[in-house]
Image: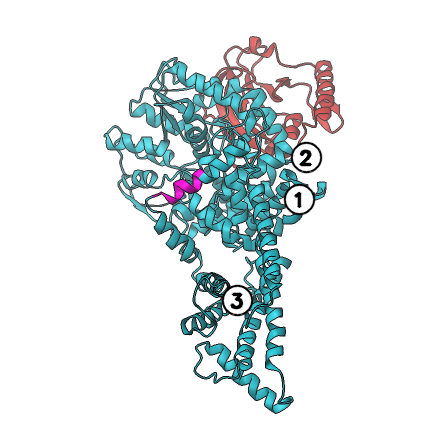
Chain colours: A cyan, B red
Amino acid sequence: MEYPQYFSLIEILALLIFSLGFCANLAFWLRGGLSRTREGGMGEKLLYLLGTLFKTVFRRDFLKLLSLDVLFQRTLTREDPTRWPMHFPLFLGFCILFFIGSLGDQFAQWGWIELDKDTRWFAFTNDLAGLILLAGVLLALHRRYILRLPYLKTFFEDKVVVVLLLVSLVSGYVVEGLRLLSTHSPIESRASFVGVALAGAFSRGVSLYAPTNLDWSTAHLLVWWFHAIVSLTFFCYIPYSRLFHLFGTGLTLLINSQNRRADLVGADPSGTVPNFTIKQLIELSGCTRCGECLKVCETYKDRTVDPIAPAIKLKEARKHLLHKYGPDWVSSLLGGRNCSQQDLSTMSEAAFRCTLCGHCTQVCPSKIDLQGIWYSLRQEYSTALGLHPKGFKLLKEGVIKEGNIFSYPNVDRALWVDFVGDLPPEGIKKPRAKVMYFVGCVSSFSPLAQDVPQTFASLLIKAGVDFTILGPDECCCGFPLMAAGMKEQMLGLIKHNVEKVRTLGADTIIFNCPSCYMTWRQEYSPHLPGVSMKHSTEFLLELIREGRLRLNPPQQDTLKVTYHDPCDLGRNQGVYEAPREVLHSIPGLEFRESRNQRDRAICCGGGGVLESADPKMATDISYKTYDSFRETGAQTLVTACPQCKRMFQGARKHLHGPMEVVDITELLLRCL
Amino acid sequence: MARYEDIFLPDEFYYDGKDHLWAKLEGGSGSTRHLVRVGLDVFGQKAAGTAAYVKLLPAGKTVAKGRSFGSLEAGKYIGPLKAPVGGKIVEVNQEVIDNPRHVNTDPYGKGWFVVIEPSNLAEDLKDLVQEATNVQKWLEKEYKEYKEKGLFAEK
């Protein structure tokens, strides 16, 4: 069949609508900053985007990434084995039909290639691709409407997409069947096997129920128009719907394949740089709302309300940012929303109902750095819009005025030292030392966590380490401000603490608190070249290996212990082995690994300053996580974070739990 | 007894004007061989909220005035408990460690923290709020300030 001449005009119109949507998305991406500290001009941003793509394309493993991650979508198999058989056929079928079926046909019309609809391989491939796509659609419908998987959230646009896809697919087969009938030639030998079957069925049906002189050509033309309009509508809809993840996810996978968190470093003193980087705005387009993040989100599981669901947070944030960053035409085209104060308050509350544990980032098949987006979102709601939990004001004032999160006079920061039993006569606050122990706010002030610095200091003394603390000169590292979305206030703290380190002449800084450790490594290290930063478990392991700490069995019988990986130490810093090796070096200790270990660890509930935003949610999570260790049969739950210890101590008390909770330093001190 | 709104402070006690710890002189006669029982006053516990954890130095340890003899974690307060007088800790209230709620339910009774054998009592008592009239005045002033700043913990 020859296409009507004016159909080309319709195709051009569709292409224009698609291109407009594509450009709108691109314009939105370019509203992001180059980094967290610099916005950059439009030229620079385009160069950055092209440069990033260029760098990615010329990476040694680009082809592997492109084929395995983007095309074969292997990341989908990692979390949910049933998802790949649904999504890959959708992707494969769509790609074949679009690139081979539609474009091939178009090129043939233009005379670029020798092909017609009866070319055997072409007809067969199209019909097969349709079946592959249909299988994907049916599986998707089965998951969404029969199995009703709770983590799959369905919105109007999802229904539109499925309807368009199904109608386009079915009408495509009908068109082929009618085309075969309209050619008045034997059809049994044709390669479009579904079309042949349908043509036979139509022919038999018509001979039974309708006049035999039906004009198949007219019927074909009518259905063809219907199919063409539906298919072009689907094509046009891509950049205006979540279907745009076809581009967003692919780009995210390529950009984030190596270092997802590079853009988090730094703080903007002027407050004028957008809270979101280009990379993060691309990531917002990369979310497929597959729901993997919902499965592991402890705060969502606690409340199961939509605004807390990570994927929904991304969706709502995108609408808000589209409106905020504009321009107006982009916002209007892509569904930006001028959120009411009530909407923004709900979104803000949801953003702070999060432990920043990073589990969502870990499982995201699109490799979106969700955690980085949570920090940016908090910055957006808290600082840009002034929407944050009530307690954060006190937290901020405490940190800025006193240098600690508890608003206590910082001069009393080292009162815990009075509890250390074997202090050397010169004390542990010295004017100069090679090793500096950064204690952190929770360890300094909380009676539930003070055992940690006390025992760690005792261990250092016993190992003969020449170390010092900063005492009242130590200020909060700034992590709580970063988590509260008040990052710009950190700069003063960074400057203060860095100066103290320089004055001491320290070349090594050690930490008990994983959040302090993470913050120093990310935010402070550029200011302290050559200074080594270690978590207490890494430092203690060195002391054990050097023979400076000789360990004995902690008790006469074998002690069964399990270990909780603190989020900011394990998943967010990659320190999994040091604490385990320390535990394995204790004689007479039976180590029982938990199911939720390493990058699958569940947060204690105390992360992300959740306690300040929603204490009940924080404690509920701590109960659940503490309980999850019972199946190990361990007598002792060991952790390596003062905040985790605090939370689990509370859980143990509430649940009358059998496992004692200790920090790894406490266990070691018992073994000396 | 000094009273203001729902706060009451026994006027025979001494009070740390900043941290709201009370000091009760026990035993001895005159200023010799006194022991000092220490706790958190009603005002302090209302500001701190529900006590969740109390940690105290063991008996036998010495503590200087203004230094930490323990620490408290409550709904709205996490931090040290500072000695209103210096000396040797001779008794520690295990009951309040086991059940920190005593701090809220019985602040002048079961909620005490430690008993200190003071080393320089006369000097250390000087800057504590004492005598009925002063306690009443201080209470009213503090109450108004706390109320104004919203520093009392919500129930």
Alpha-carbon distance for marks 2 and 1? 48 Å
Local secondary structure at mark 1: helix
Where A118 sits versus A316, above or below?
below
The overriding secondary structure of the stretch rendered in magenta is helix
Alpha-carbon distance for marks 1 and 3? 33 Å
Q: Quadrant of the N terminus of chain A?
A: bottom right
- In the rendered image, residue B142, in percent from the top left (x then y), is placed at 70, 20
Find out whether residue A60 is within the magenta segment: no
Residue B96 shows up from this direction: no
- In the rendered image, residue A10, in percent from the top left (x then y), is placed at 62, 60
Local secondary structure at mark 3: helix
Where A129 sits versus A425, above or below?
below
Q: Which residue is mark 3?
A: A137
Q: Which residue is mark 1?
A: A329
* Residue drawn at the location 43% of the way across and 38% of the way down: A51
Q: Closer to the observer: label 2 or label 3? A: 3
Q: Which mark is residue B154?
A: 2
Amino acid type of the residue tagged 1 in the rendering: Trp
- In the rendered image, residue A211, in percent from the top left (x then y), is placed at 65, 89
Chain of residue at mark 3: A
Question: Circle 3: is it few (<14), some (14-19), or many (20+) Cα within 10 Å?
Answer: many
Instruction: Using the rendered view, name the quadrant where residue A151 is placed.
Output: bottom right
Question: Circle 1: is it few (<14), some (14-19), or many (20+) Cα within 10 Å?
Answer: few
Q: Closer to the observer: label 1 or label 3? A: 1
Instruction: Using the rendered view, name the quadrant where residue A230 is placed.
Output: bottom right
Chain of residue at mark 1: A
Task: Name the residue nearer the viewer: A559 or A405.
Answer: A405
Task: Look at the image and give the residue range highlighted in magenta.
Answer: A51-59
* Residue drawn at the location 69% of the way across and 14% of the way down: B131
Amino acid type of the residue tagged 3 in the rendering: Val
Q: Closer to the observer: label 2 or label 1? A: 1
